[in-house]
Amino acid sequence: MKRRSLAFALLIFCAPAVAQAADNGIVTTASKHSVQDTMDRFAAAAKERGFTIVARVNHAGAAAKAGLKLRPTQLLVFGNPKGGTPIMAAAPTAGIDLPLKALAWEDASGKVWLSYNSPAWLKARHGIEGVDKPLAGMGKALAAMAAKAVE
């Protein structure tokens, strides 16, 4: 009986954390490559699709310069005004999330992941209306670029 109670209590207390993690708008995919290679592959796929690379941030490198340790983590900032401008025209606050970003990171067990914001989450977050086609295109492009990066 005590085991059932403990299991039930864990389920109740852990469920909100799981739901929150699943509902945070971040799409995360496991990669077969290192952080460096995953981000190189993602950047190449983005360029192939006509995206401009705005910045690439090596968070682990910056941490090392500050005398701190951080597992390999890189952020790519990229965009295309043809897709982003209609979205920001419909909801100017979307500019805080655009240009788009992708994060390649290594977890504590050495597994590499690629994460990015879901366009559906951006739509809900900013109340974006009337630009479903650019948002759908963004979603397809992100999924395709992520697939190329992690395989």
Image (cartoon, rainbow, N blue to C red):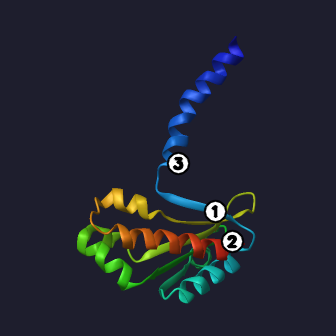
| Residue in view at x 52 percent, y 75 percent | 141
Mark 3 or mark 1, whichever is nearer to me: 1
- Quick check: marks 1 and 2 in contact, CB under 8 Å? yes
- Taking depth in this image into account, of 7 and 59 the one nearest to the observer is 7
Q: Secondary structure at mark 3?
A: helix
The kind of residue tagged 3 is: Ala
Question: Residue 3, percent across and down?
Answer: 71, 17
Q: How far is the residue under mark 1 from the one under mark 2?
A: 8 Å
Asked whether the viewer can see residue 97, the reply is no
Residue 59: % across, % down? 57, 74
| Location of residue 26 with respect to 47 vertically, above or below | above
Decide: is 11 above or below 35: above
N-terminal of the pair, mark 3 or mark 1, is 3
Residue 60: quadrant of the picture: bottom right
Numbered disc 1: secondary structure: strand
Instruction: Give x and y (percent) for residue 104.
Output: 61, 71
Q: What residue does disc 3 label?
A: 21
What is the three-letter code of the residue carrying label 2?
Val
116 left or right of 82 in image? right
The residue at which mark 1 appears reads as 29
Q: Dot 2 lies on which element?
A: helix
